[in-house]
């Protein structure tokens, strides 16, 4: 054991004795390990972040589990749901029935009537320029700030307001609460988002692992000569392997330390970030011990494995280093294990399942399976063109003989391009889909409440919303119809003016006093908890349109003059105001529309039927930044790989020059050796990326649509990167690598 430690310590010392190439290799390896470590530690922190966030939501949740709480030491509450710039705005109106009523977590006392406690993020938003529309959504004076105990995250928009009118609204938006955190709650699972995040992490992390391998191989010839000298003084083969592993531990240890520091810096800033309207406190960001230990072990094992793989096929003898070269015979079966496993695990995505963990593992497995597949494709591509000029024959010989070495740096680009294609194609489709209605007949907003259903009240409701420029409002009152004989749901009865009815059905000509029917209603219908209503004999047929037609088998539509007098509030389900924008965008009008709704009734439910903001905007930004960093890393890795291969083949290129091969022939041969793997790899990346994009689109429940720009932009970037890096190395080295002086050997 002492001997093993001594040999590994010797390897650590040699890590600083490799000259400029050795120091470059150590620095690059350290950077790659640091980046990978930071990403792994952040990934290991995700379970703790989600669990802690869930615990916070449950602690301040004003939920009763659907149970009516009797009066006592209770708090009257009413939830107000709104949004601002695409972020949810959580409001809670409250009024204590006794002094012993439960105080919400995060505030010291109940807010007085007309005053509110706000979250730090909401206070900042209210103080920002252009916040008048936000201020109109909460007509209360600020009394204080909500503490961390009352918030799910530091960027959450929330307020607690006192409202003495709640006793009059019990059952109409207000209810009694005995204590906070009495019931468990769960946030809606978003399978597509989980899978996208998993794919993005894999897209950014796998190329980093490949870059680490490329950097560890750089300058390997100098290391091999040092190991040969150790063999000369009595070291055996096992000793050289242990020394090489010890040498790799230096950049690994430095990278782990630098990665941990990077993780701590990101952790300190994470409270300022919000992804998918989710933010977390810095104190909640800590890795699970088991996952953190596995991450460190994975990095160390990866570095050691890369070192040992680099020594495979190398015979380190006391008098020199000999590289064994045999004809490459790749087997396909084991290369298909990961892709097949990935396809099997992704099966729920095609059957409507929600197994996000299984699908995410499948996506990562399929993406990882590209790495061993790329070398197998190269001989197939080369074999398709057996003849050709001398440069092609030279290139094809090398590609057939050792396709693994020819594709080392390219595989990172292939993996990155495949992941970016899948994500960009999905983002492009979602971006198109969010700008259109699910049904063209739907309005832009639907506002539902239990307000007065009289014609005059509905006109006042329309007028309240139409004070917002570019808004056209129509309102209908809805009553549920049921069959008293079977006590089953039958349909709906709608009351509204001609313009309102025309918004939910195809009615043709219309005048006040007209009535319409849809489906088989018979001569009369029964309103649930209301009167029996006769269907006018002159009622004309109509066809419901848009979302209103979903799951409705029969309906009666009345204009105000034709509506039965006995309706009023008896059996009223809700009053719905449909809003269509005549100018502006949802993002521009959202604040004014929600402020108008709150001025009418704070418990009105405002639903946007078109997206107000880009849900995946933050992920797009993260992907763009991450992919740019990865491309730079891959470019650097490619430069190292090309330089290393030219250095290894300098005598072979010198022989070609000595026997009459022109410099142009040699350079074209080297260029072809770089470009053929790229073409084959990018073709595989396009097919895989499109397949993964289809999976993500199905999970996102959007139509499958492949955007050519989203597909070919990453392909063009990857191809350009390889071409630029190869030329950047070849041109300066052209004269040196094609000189017969390379045949000199001592």
Image (cartoon, grey):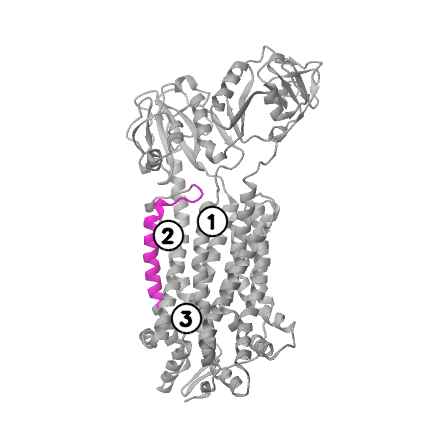
Is 496 placed above or below 408 here? Answer: above
Is the N terminus in the top left, top right, bottom left or bottom right quadrant? Answer: bottom left
Pointer 2 residue: 287
For the stretch drawn in magenta, what is the main secondary structure?
A: helix
Given residues 229 and 22, the one toward you in this image is: 22
Residue located beneath label 1 in the image? 620
Q: Is residue 163 left or right of residue 201?
A: left
Query: In the image, 690: left or right of 600?
Result: right
Q: Which residue is mark 3?
A: 216
Query: Which residue is at 68% across, 13% downward?
Result: 536
Category of crowding for the residue at label 1, using alpha-carbon neighbours closer than 10 angstroms: few (below 14), some (14–19), many (at least 20) = some
Question: Dot 3: what SS?
Answer: helix
Q: Secondary structure at mark 1?
A: helix
Q: For the magenta stretch, what is the residue range?
A: 251-277
Q: Residue 186: which disc?
A: none
Q: CA distance from mark 3 to mark 2?
A: 28 Å
Mark 1–mark 3 Cα distance, whole angstroms, equals 32 Å
Q: For the residue carrying disc 3, how many other residues have a C-alpha within 10 Å: few (<14), some (14-19), or many (20+)?
A: many
* N-term-proximal mark, 1 vs 3: 3
Quarter of the image containing the C terminus?
A: bottom left
Residue at image point 43% right, 62% down: 632
């Amino acid at each position: 054991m002492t001997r093993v430690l001594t040999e590994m310590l010797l390897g650590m010392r040699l890590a600083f004795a490799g000259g400029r190439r050795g120091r470059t290799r150590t620095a690059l390896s350290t950077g790659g390990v640091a980046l990978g470590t930071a990403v792994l530690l952040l990934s290991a922190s995700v379970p703790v972040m989600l669990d802690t966030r869930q615990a916070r939501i449950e602690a301040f949740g004003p939920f009763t589990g659907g149970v009516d709480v009797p009066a006592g030491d209770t708090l009257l509450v009413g939830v107000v749901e709104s949004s601002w710039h695409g972020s949810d705005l959580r409001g809670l109106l409250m009024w204590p029935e006794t002094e012993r009523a439960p105080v919400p977590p995060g505030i010291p006392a109940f807010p007085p009537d007309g005053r509110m406690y706000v979250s730090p993020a909401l206070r900042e938003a209210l103080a920002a320029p252009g916040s008048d529309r936000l201020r109109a959504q909460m007509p209360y004076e600020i009394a204080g700030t909500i503490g961390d105990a009352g918030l799910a995250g530091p960027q959450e928009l929330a307020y607690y307001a006192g409202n003495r009118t709640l006793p009059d609204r019990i059952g109409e938006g207000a209810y009694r609460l005995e204590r906070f955190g009495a019931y468990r709650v769960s946030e809606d699972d978003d399978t597509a988002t989980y899978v996208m995040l998993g794919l993005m992490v894999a897209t950014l992390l796998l190329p980093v692992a490949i870059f680490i391998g490329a950097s560890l191989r750089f300058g390997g010839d100098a290391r091999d000569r040092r190991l040969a000298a150790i063999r000369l003084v009595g070291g055996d083969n096992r000793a050289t392997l242990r020394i090489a592993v010890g040498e790799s531990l230096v950049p690994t240890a430095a990278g782990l330390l630098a990665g941990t520091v990077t993780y701590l810096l990101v952790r300190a800033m994470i409270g300022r970030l919000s992804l998918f309207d989710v933010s977390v406190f810095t104190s909640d960001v800590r890795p699970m011990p088991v996952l953190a230990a596995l991450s460190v072990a994975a990095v160390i094992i990866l570095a050691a494995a890369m070192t040992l793989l680099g020594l495979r096929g190398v015979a380190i003898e006391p008098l020199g280093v000999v590289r064994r070269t045999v004809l490459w015979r790749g087997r396909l079966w084991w290369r298909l294990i990961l892709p097949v496993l990935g396809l099997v695990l992704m099966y729920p995505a095609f059957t409507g399942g929600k197994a996000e963990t299984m699908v995410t593992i499948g996506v990562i497995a399929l993406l990882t399976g590209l790495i061993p597949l790329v070398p197998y494709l190269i001989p197939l591509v080369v074999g398709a063109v057996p003849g050709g000029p001398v440069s092609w024959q030279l290139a094809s010989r090398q590609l057939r003989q050792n396709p693994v070495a020819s594709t080392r740096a390219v595989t990172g680009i292939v993996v990155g391009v495949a992941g970016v294609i899948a994500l960009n194609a999905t983002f492009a489709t979602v971006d198109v889909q969010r700008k259109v209605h699910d049904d063209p007949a739907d309005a832009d907003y639907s506002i539902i409440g239990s307000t007065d259903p009289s014609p005059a009240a509905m006109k006042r409701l329309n007028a309240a919303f139409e004070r917002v420029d570019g808004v056209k409002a129509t309102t209908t009152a809805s009553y549920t119809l049921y069959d008293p004989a079977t006590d089953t749901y039958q349909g709906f009865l709608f009351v509204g003016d001609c313009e309102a009815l025309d918004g939910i059905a195809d009615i043709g000509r219309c005048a006040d006093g007209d009535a319409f029917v849809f489906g088989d209603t018979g001569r009369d219908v029964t309103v649930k908890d209301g009167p029996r209503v006769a269907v006018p004999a002159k009622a004309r047929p109509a066809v419901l349109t848009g979302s209103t037609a979903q799951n409705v088998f029969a309906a009666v539509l009345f204009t105000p003059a034709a509506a039965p007098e006995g309706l009023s509030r008896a059996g009223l389900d809700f009053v719905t105001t449909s809003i269509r924008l005549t100018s502006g965008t949802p993002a521009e009008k959202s604040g004014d529309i929600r402020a108008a709704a709150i001025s009418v009734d704070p418990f009105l439910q405002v639903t946007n039927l078109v997206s107000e903001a880009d849900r995946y905007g933050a992920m797009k930004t993260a992907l763009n930044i991450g992919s740019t960093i990865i491309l730079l890393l891959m470019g650097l890795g490619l430069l190292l790989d090309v330089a290393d291969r030219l250095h290894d083949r300098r005598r072979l290129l010198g022989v070609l020059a000595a026997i009459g091969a022109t410099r142009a022939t040699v350079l074209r041969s080297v260029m072809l050796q770089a470009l053929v793997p790229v073409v084959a790899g990018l073709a595989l990346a396009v097919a895989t990326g499109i397949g993964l994009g289809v999976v993500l689109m199905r999970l996102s429940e959007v139509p499958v649509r492949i955007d050519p720009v989203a597909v070919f932009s990453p392909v063009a970037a990857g191809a350009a990167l390889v071409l630029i890096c190869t030329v950047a190395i070849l041109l300066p080295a052209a004269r040196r690598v094609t000189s017969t002086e390379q045949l000199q050997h001592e």
